[in-house]
Image (cartoon, helix red, strand yellow):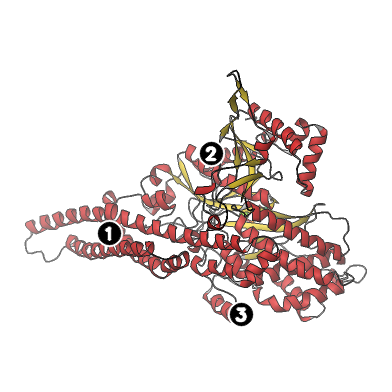
Amino acid sequence: MANDIRESFGRMVFSDEVMKERLPAEVYSAMKKTIGEGRRLDISVATEVAYAMKEWAIELGATHFTHWFQPLSGVTAEKHDAFLSPSRDGTPVTEFSGKELVRGEPDASSFPSGGLRATFEARGYTAWDPTSYAFVKDRVLCVPTAFCSYGGEALDKKTPLLRSMEAVGKEALRVLRALGDNGTKKVNVTVGAEQEFFLIKREDFDKRRDLIYTGRTLFGAPAPKDQQLDDHYFGAFKPAVSAFMDDLNEELWALGIYAKTEHNEVAPAQHELAPVFCQANIACDQNQLTMEIMKKVASRHGLVCLLHEKPFEGVNGSGKHNNWSLATDGGRNLLDPGDTPQANARFLVFLSAVVCAVDEYQDLLRASVASAGNDRRLGKSEAPPAIVSVFLGDELTELLRAAADGREYTPHAADLLGTGVHVLPKIPKDNTDRNRTSPFAFTGNKFEFRMVGSSDSIAGPNIALNAAVADELRSIADELEGTDGSVAAVYGVIGKRLKEHFRIIFNGDGYGKKWVEEARERGLLNLPTTADAVVRMLDSKNVGMFTRTGVYSEAEIESRCEIMLENYAKRLAIEADAMVDMINHDILPSAVKYSKVLSDGAAAKKSISPRLSICMEEKLLDRLADLTDELYECSNILSASTAELARADNAVEAAEFCRDRLLSDMDRARAAADEIEKIVGREFWCYPTYGDLMHNVR
Ligand code: ADP
Ligand code: MG
């Protein structure tokens, strides 16, 4: 790579600059219209673009192309086709047609469709998303695409994301028009996803089947030192981590991803990387790529990157903070409190719309981040609880309370404009601890949705959020359009809505038990598991909203719901099976070996002093005997439970069985195994301990 980072940035991206340079002027301008205004693309334009793209990619060493898409399995999918084909005389030529650029037909039958396939045609096709740039990765030209059935049902995460962006953009524009803004042409969703992850040594990873099969440790006694001293957060990188980060940044920058902020997180071996925000669908593509490249680069460094939400019990888990806002094509952030009354009115409308939408659709937001992995994080003291609430900070809360009560807000004299018209106080960026406990915090000019799991695609949560806000803005626009769009009219429209939804605003400590009580009194939902949350997607309120906004059809919601529940039960079944495997083949044999040493030791002692009553070895043996009996029983119970789970009639029943039975069976087995680990001598223990895993990367 070039030494100057400015030269290598975006080197692997078929960016606007590259298109300008390589496409005929009229083709370039047609592309720009498609990207900027969502215009449909003509096949003759596609043919020219495909040719330029192919030549460009081959110059960068590409040999294949692929439609790069995001099926409902949660990972990105790609099927490579070589550019090379034989010509009539047998000599090789390179081919990539406009048709191949625009549409692909992967065999869809092995991707999860959540029942959509039963209802509709099995085959699916991929369609180019020209708003997300193509790129070259591992010698493959990747064309970002949406994945749909022939009936038009979305089989992926990108299509509904694009629909939701369109919905919220359209309604936001109506609101702006009603407020007298005739200049703005388009409103975009902006997203910046901070990514947390762990790095451990490959050789340690390879010795633990739980990590191999499930991405998290299913057993493990706490290390004497983990995060008690808070000495890892923002500490200097260890050399191995630093080398990894250098390599990672270089690859991400080449792919046009503005990897910006990197730091150590709270738990030992935990880190964070945040990019510069961009349009939501691109942020989603880039986050998927970031996760993939993190894993790949780690493996080059003899490390493994753990993206699981809770790799280690007892220390912080990993999330993905989804920073979200709306911006006009002119670059104006609609959640930025401006300093004119007009700007204030606009800010108030959009702020209120988000607050009301989050309250109305708390269940959907919770469901949008639900997974077996993330359930372990939500509700623990390092993460937001499973109760959705909004943090606004004291000043904004007072302002909205006044609006809700129909009172005029009386700010300090300094906050009056020369004209004597009230403007908002300057909103300080609130970085207090209380704000850190909030699942949905306003942080000065954007909202930060903190419930998203570290391994999850950000598509789901952004779909839910965009759609919910779109619906709220739609009904606000309906009312505002009948007014003069003045500040007073704005207060009139948002006041009664805020009154109804004020309960969602909570600026206190989200970790405390007190909050659980208070939230219940406020009527807020507490949905601790995926089994509780996901079924709510099918409530008529939610189906109504999704169909009204055109984001999901009813069948599409049902399919997502089905897949999420299925995935939850399957993951937990794998975890339970992995536990049985480790108990029988690793943990019990270790304990047996150590017991033999203890009993030999006891016998030796007794042979020297036969009158010795009970020695240390015998006490340990006794304790080990109890614990191994218990663990053996746990293993049998787990086996019986997974067999019963396999007989569940449907996804809801399976998920509920996991919630009500399997999880507690797993907890019981773990408790016994971790006690055994505390007793067995180090050299007899079967795999690297928490101390090894968290402290071996240096
Ligand atoms: P912190 O950890 O204090 O929340 P970071 O700097 O780690 O802050 O991350 C903030 C994230 O928010 C970055 O990805 C940033 O690009 C993003 N962000 C900033 N402004 C906006 C905005 N208007 N819309 C969406 N994301 C934003
Ligand atoms: Mg951060």
Disc 2 residue type (three-letter):
Ala
Q: Pinpoint residue 32: horizontal percent, then vertical percent.
A: 79, 42
Foreground pick, 507 / 36:
36
Which residue is under mark 3?
Answer: 522
Which residue is under mark 1?
Answer: 679
Question: For numbered disc 1, what is the local secondary structure?
Answer: helix
Which residue is under mark 2?
Answer: 243
Mark 3 or mark 1: which is in front? 3
546 to the left or right of 644: right
Q: Report if the beta carbon of the residue with label 1 is closer than 8 angstroms to ligand 2.
A: no
Q: Pinpoint residue 391: horizontal percent, then vertical percent.
A: 66, 68
Residue at 63% over, 68% down: 543
The reply to whether residue 261 is visible in this rendering is: no
Query: From what the image shows, is residue 687 above or below residue 398?
Result: above
Give the Cα distance between marks 3 and 1: 47 Å
Query: From what the image shows, is residue 675 above or below residue 130?
Result: below
Quarter-of-image position of residue 45: top right
Tell me which numbered mark, 2 or 1, is placed earlier along the sequence.
2
